[in-house]
Image: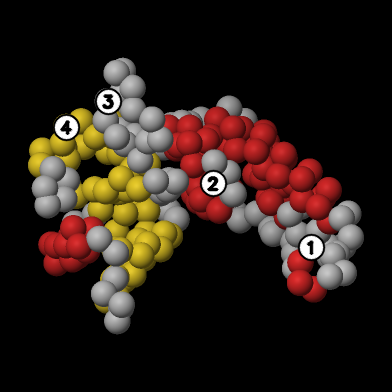
Amino acid sequence: MSTHRTTNLPFLALPETVFFPHTFMDLELTLPHHQELFLTAQSQRLPVGVFLAKRLISEDEPEPYARLGSFGRIIELTACASGSCNVTMLGLYRARINRVTRHRPYPLANISVLTDHLHVTSPEQFRKTLNDIVELVQRFKLTKERPVVALPKPEKWREFFGTLVNAVAAFLPADAHKKQEWLNQDDLIKRYELMRQEMARLWKLNRVLMQVPPVENPNLN
């Protein structure tokens, strides 16, 4: 659901990159127009959008990027001796591109800011869901002693759940177009349900890999 519209915000489309709200992203900027985009945005204190570049373009979707992505705030921008720049961003909100208002030297867009929703039917069921995602995340640490993550106070559950879901989505080694499906989902519970399938699959794979004996030939490591 759209909350409000904003115009003339800069964005860029990147392959294999999906940006989630409330997560950090590090980028290396080697192209001059990308550097100009971020330097201008930093000077004007504008958020910058990151949208997934498409693999294929169809007649139904002729744009070379997904229409839904996320905007973030520039935390740090550093010039490197090589001529490139390193930038760290913090995700602020999801957004949909309504219309591109300029293409060069870098694109500007009229966007609709989108909100994430969390429909809780039962506090007890929500607590179980929180415990479920925490336990599933902890399973990836295949040791007998795992760190115990205690749930915060109930009034912090919604904030904790949204941050945890987006953080896990950002770091899961899943296909970018699968992550785009997660980002498209407004309901955080449903987003987690989609992610859980991938998390369970990766956890099982991780368990199998732990059973594989190490390679004795050091040249093959």
| Cα–Cα gap, marks 2 and 4 | 27 Å
Crowd tier of the residue under label 1, counting other residues whose Cα lies within 10 Å: few below 14, some 14–19, many 20 or above: few
Would residue 35 be found to the left or right of residue 16 on screen?
A: left
Would residue 191 be found to the left or right of residue 114 on screen?
A: right
Total numbered labels: 4
Q: Secondary structure at mark 3?
A: loop
- What residue lies at 17% left-to-right and 40% top-to-bottom? 109
Q: Position of residue 25 (x, y in %)?
A: 41, 59
| Cα–Cα gap, marks 2 and 3 | 27 Å
Crowd tier of the residue under label 4, counting other residues whose Cα lies within 10 Å: few below 14, some 14–19, many 20 or above: some
Q: Position of residue 130 (x, y in %)?
A: 65, 44
| Cα–Cα gap, marks 4 and 1 | 48 Å
Instruction: Locate residue 127: give its quadrant.
Output: top right
Mark 1 = which residue? 146
* Disc ID at residue 169: 2
Q: Which of marks 3 and 4 precedes in the sequence?
A: 3
Would residue 71 be found to the left or right of residue 10 on screen?
A: right
**Does the residue at mark 4 contact the one at mark 3 (Cβ under 8 Å)?**
no
Q: Which of marks 3 and 1 precedes in the sequence?
A: 3
- What residue lies at 29% left-to-right and 34% top-to-bottom? 64
Q: Secondary structure at mark 2?
A: helix
| Cα–Cα gap, marks 1 and 3 | 48 Å
Q: Secondary structure at mark 1?
A: loop
Number of the front mark, 1 or 3: 3
Instruction: Locate residue 57: give its quadrant.
Output: top left
- What residue lies at 35% left-to-right and 48% top-to-bottom? 14
Mark 4 = which residue? 99
**Does the residue at mark 2 contact the one at mark 3 (Cβ under 8 Å)?**
no
- What residue lies at 49% left-to-right and 42% top-to-bottom? 176
Q: Which of marks 1 and 2 precedes in the sequence?
A: 1
| Cα–Cα gap, marks 2 and 1 | 21 Å
